[in-house]
Amino acid sequence: MPSSSEIVEPGRYDYTLTVEFPSVYTPEHTPPAFRLANSYETTRTRHASGQFDLSESVARPLLRQYFVGQVCEDMDPEIVTVTRFELTPVPA
């Protein structure tokens, strides 16, 4: 069972999420014949932030996974690493 620190209580929250994932970068305007030779592996980053209202208690890992799913819906979740997930209660 999750500890109380892993449960997010109902309320209004600001959130910040940063994820990283492996990618292959090909410089813009690379002619097709040179794309493979000029491409290289890299790590890319995506950021998301916003505010939301939570109507019932939920486990923090489930909430984090929800936002990761929103930000990374176009990629395999197995390659995504969460590097930052912060929740801040918004005062009423």
Image (cartoon, rainbow, N blue to C red):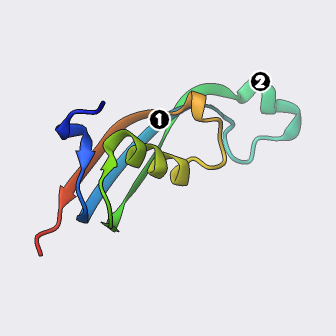
81 or 6, which is in the foreground? 6
Which amino acid type is marked by label 1? Glu
Q: Residue at x 37, y 39 (%)?
A: 61
Q: Quadrant of the C terminus?
A: bottom left
**Which labelled disc corresponds to residue 73?**
none
Which amino acid type is marked by label 2? Ala
Q: Residue at x 53, y 54 (%)?
A: 70
Residue at the farthest bottom position: 92
Q: Position of residue 34 (x, y in %)?
A: 82, 31
Q: Position of residue 90 (x, y in %)?
A: 16, 67
Q: Which structural element holds mark 1?
A: strand
Residue at the farthest left position: 91
Q: Nearer the viewer, mark 2 or mark 1?
A: 1
Q: Position of residue 28 (x, y in %)?
A: 69, 46
**Measured along the vertical axis of the image, is residue 8 above or below residue 61?**
below
Q: Position of residue 50 (x, y in %)?
A: 34, 65
**Measured along the vertical axis of the image, is residue 83 above or below residue 86?**
above
Q: Residues within 10 Å of mark 1 (few under 14, many from 20)?
A: some
Identify the residue position indicated by label 2 in the image.
37
Report how far apart the C-alphas of labels 2 and 1 lie in the structure.
24 Å
Residue 32, picture quadrant: top right
Q: Residue at x 28, y 33 (%)?
A: 2
Identify the residue position indicated by label 1 in the image.
20
Q: Residue at x 23, y 55 (%)?
A: 9
**Measured along the vertical axis of the image, is residue 16 above or below residue 22?**
below
Considering only order in the chain, which callout, 1 or 2, is on the residue closer to the N terminus? 1
Q: Quadrant of the N terminus?
A: top left
56 or 51, which is in the foreground? 56
Q: Which structural element holds mark 2?
A: helix
31 horizontally vs 28: left or right: right
